[in-house]
Structure formats: C-alpha cells, structure tokens
Amino acid sequence: MYTIQGKGVSKGVADGPIYFYRRGGGEVVKTAVSDVEAEKKRFEDARQTAMQQLAELYDKAVAEVGEEGAALFEAHQMMLDDLDYIDGINDMIEGESINAEYAVSQIAEQFAEMFASMDDAYMQARAADVKDISTRVIGILSGVVAGGIDSDVPVILASDDLAPSETVQLDKSKILGFVTSGGSGNSHTAILARTMGIPAIIGIGDALTEGLEGKSAIIDGSTGEVAIDPDQITSQRLLKKQAEERALKALLDQLKGKENVTLDGRKVMVYCNIGSPDDVDPVLANDGGGIGLFRSEFLYLQNDDYPTEEQQFQAYKTVAERMGGKRVIIRTLDIGADKQADYFQLDKEENPAMGLRAIRICLTRPEVFKTQLRALYRASAYGKIAIMFPMITSVWEVQEIKRICDGVKAELRAEEIPFNENVELGIMIETPSAVMMSDRLAKEVDFFSVGTNDLTQYTLAVDRQGNNLDKFFDSHHPAVLRMLKMAAENAHKAGIWIGICGELGADVSLTETFLAIGIDELSVSPASVLPLRSAIRSIDTTKNSQKILDDLLSD
Ligand code: PEP
Ligand code: MG
C-alpha cells in the first residue's frame, strides 16, 4: 500500500477501484485486417451497441426535455440503420481488407460531403449528424465510451481535469468520488462533486499515473489522502471515518422539516445550487428550501447545437413543477471563459475570463437570449420561477435586459401563451463593478445573489481555474467580505433581498459573519443544506454581530 496526497475539495470517504476517464478524439489509424468477416462482425456489434445507447439517450431526453428535444436521438438511430451507410462500410472493409474504425471514418466523410453539397438547408445540416453517429461507433470500436465511464461497478473517477461539457455527460450513478491531477477548488469537477455529495481530491499531479487503473483505493475528501491498495490499518481507519460521517449525516437528517432560524429568531432562506434537472432529487432529499442557482449552461454544453425553445421550456418546467411552488432561480446562460460550446463559434480570446461571456453574449446575440427568455417565461406558468442574470457590471445592461424581457412578455401575450407577469428578476453580484454600483442596481431588480467564485477572482485578480493559485484564491479576504457588506447595505436600502450562491455560502465558519452582514439567503450544494441549518440554529445574532462588523472595517 502507499499514499498519495492531493487537495480535498469535497469531503467524504469513498472506497472502490480507480478508473481513468475515457476521453475520445485522436486520429483514426488505417490498419490491414486478415479476417474481414470478423471485422464486419465487429462493426455490426458496435453499431448495435450504438443503437442501444441512442435508444437510452432518447428515453432520458424525453423525460428531461420532452419529445421534440429528444427527436435528434431518434433521427440518429434511423441514420445508423441506413442500408447505404451500412453497406458502404462493409464493402470497404471487405474490398480493402481494412479495420472497421477506418472504414467508418471514410464513409462518414463521404456521406458528410454529400449532405453538405445539397441545396436543401435541412439536408446540409445532416452532415454533422452522420459525423456524430460515426464518432459514436468509432468510439465503441476503439474502447472509448460515451459518458466517459464503461464499468459495471461504481468507480473512483480519475482524470487530469474534466471540462464542464464532460461533467454534464457523465454517468453519475457510476461515480463514488473524483481524483484529478490538475484542477482547482472552484473547477467544475469540484462543484459537481459537492452537488452530488461525494468526495473529490484535486491537484495530485504526476503521482496520478495511468498505472493506477483498476487498483483499489480509499480516498478522503477532507484531508486529500488517496490510499492505494490500502493495508488493513489504513482501511479500518478510513472506513471508521466513513461510518462516523454517515452517522453524523443520520443525525443531521433529524433536522429535516425544521426551520433555518437562529436562536434569536432570525430566519434565513437556505436554497440549493443545481446544474441539471436530475439534481432536483438530492435537493428534495436534503430538504432544500428552493433553488437559488440553476446553472442553465448544462442545456447548452450537452448539445451539439443551440437548444430549442421547446427543449429548454421542458427542462425549466420539469424543475419548477418538481419544486412545487418553491422559488426556482434560473440563471441565464453563462457560456464563455471555461464553459465552451463549439457551436457558439466564439473567437479565441487572450483573456477569456474577461472576454465575451455570459450576459455579454446574450446582449450581443439577442436571438439566443430571447429563445431562452421565452422558454423561461413560458415555464413560469408552472411554478415559482425567478430569472437571474450573470456577470453584470453596469446599470445600462440591466435596463437593456429588462427591455428585452418586456419585449418577450409582449410577444407571449400577443400569442396568448400563459406566463407569470410578475416573474422576479435578479442579478448576480460577481464583479467589483456590480458591488460599487449596487446602490443603483438595487433599484432595478428584485434581488441580488453574490457569486463569490467570480467575485473573488475579479476582486483579487486571481484566476479561479489556476492550478497553483489556491493559496492566493482567498474567498475569506477582507476585500471580498467588505464587498459583501456594501452590496447587502445597498440591497436593503432599496428594499430587496440579497443571497450568496457562490461556493463560499456553504462555509459554516463564515455563517455568523454572513448573518452579521445581513445576508438573507444562502444557496449551497444539496449536501450542505443540513450542516448549514445546524450552524444557523446555533447562532445568536444579537451576541457578536457588531463586533464582527467592527472587525471587518477596522484596520
Ligand atoms: C460564482 O461565480 O460564484 C457563481 C456562483 O457562478 P459560477 O461558479 O457558475 O461562475
Ligand atoms: Mg460566476
């Protein structure tokens, strides 16, 4: 047995085999085969597996985004069953005695070129589809897996780091924990792990070699310890800790149904952050009071093209209905910077965190923005939806957003489509500019929600994705806390509420400070709801608040 050390970013103990994330891509190599019949069978088996995967994806998409949104997977099945396509591949394997991967890639190219040269725009668009199904078949043939995991048992997933577009496609039922060589505490792998309530360790570096594949391991997300082939003493120690954590969780479970109220009677809204409709399950299981941040990017990152209004409507409606009248704050798309979707065709930027991202894309491409707003307003007829806008820096942006919202509402009214006329509109406070302008911004909206991940990044000028910057990425920095205080004062002066939806909101060492500052809502990962409730219920805000505020401002 031996131990390697990383940084724990989501607590908990997990034991299981290490499994490396299977990433696709790479060039398809041409090789000669001697048994063409066996190669043709290999292709047929892969094609059948792909058909089965597409059928499963279709069922999942119908449940999440409705039939229209799922239609793509049905079309892909039909394409994969096309005799010209199948015969083309088999003839090539047989005629040239070559491997199935290469034949699929060549026939896919020929079909794509043929589609692309057609006059009809619909047929032209099929070029991307034939490439997509062929990539799937090639992936199966070469052992690359849709969703990155091909294991019958749950695993500790290892990788360098995962891109947001990869995390949204993971088969989450197969993951016990994450270990990554790179990454940061604010990476999307870390955020996903906290949402799922499973351990994650980042920054392991070169010690995380592919030689560890299949080895049994126990990881401790609070200390960053990764025990490989653990001996009996280590196993006992870590599994005892796992049992203690489970017991603590059972104890916290007793707080379900209780209020988030301080000893002196102050109530706090404790909501949850989610990244997809599936995440509503842990929200309900952990007694979340609402959704404080629904990162709608998932719809954009898991698609090969802009999600349609109907697809989005179904996803938002599902979440609103499942939350049954509780507030569901959906953030409009926050694409750009680290969250890239190819079809947006964004230019490569020197400084993407400061580039064309989030609301800047929406205000530059109003047609994309309007499609999302129409879906959101339509879904507002089915629950208590509120809309939140990311990366705000200026008052004019909010005024422009409101003008576009009014236009969308007028359209829906004219089309006699039902929606809630009084959907609350809020903004994220995640730039220093938004804090400094918070007195004016507060007059424009119904609520503020502080994104401490980006607010820390922009206030301290420290890249939140930076591998070696965790020491400098200090969300407890007085500059960040003073910003919170300023935004809270201005929110309350204008009579609106303020919350925190960045990762800092779950940090119970600061809960008393947040209450002293006047924070009204905390939106955290589902697994953090009950620990936070426990912290809130132990605080008396009449005791230390003044001292906390004085300390914050003293030099
Ligand atoms: C934040 O910046 O704190 C936030 C909640 O948004 P995201 O992490 O999605 O950028
Ligand atoms: Mg942000």
Image (cartoon, rainbow, N blue to C red):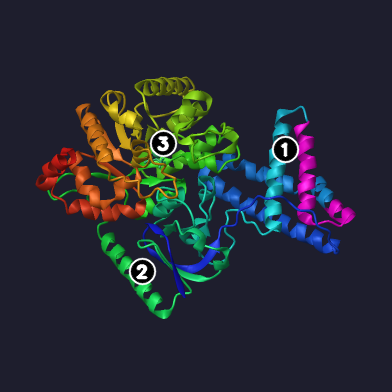
Please name which of the two marks, 3 or 2, marks the residue nearer to the observer.
2
Q: Which amino acid, mark 2?
A: Gln
Residue situated in front as seen by the camera: 73 or 245: 245
- Disc 1 marks which residue? 127
Crowdedness of circle 3 by 10 Å Cα count: few (<14), some, many (20+)?
many
Q: Which amino acid, mark 1?
A: Ala
Tell me which segment is drawn in magenta: 90-117
Give me the C-alpha separation between circle 3 and circle 2: 35 Å
Residue 82 appears in the figure: no
Q: Circles 2 and 1: CB distance less than 8 Å?
A: no
Q: Is residue 93 magenta?
A: yes
Report the residue that reaches farthest toward the right.
Answer: 95
- Disc 3 marks which residue? 331
Q: Which amino acid, mark 3?
A: Arg
Q: Classify the position of ligand 1 by quadrant: top left, top right, bottom left or bottom right.
A: top left
- Disc 2 marks which residue? 242
The CB of the residue at mark 3 lies under 8 Å from ligand 1 = yes
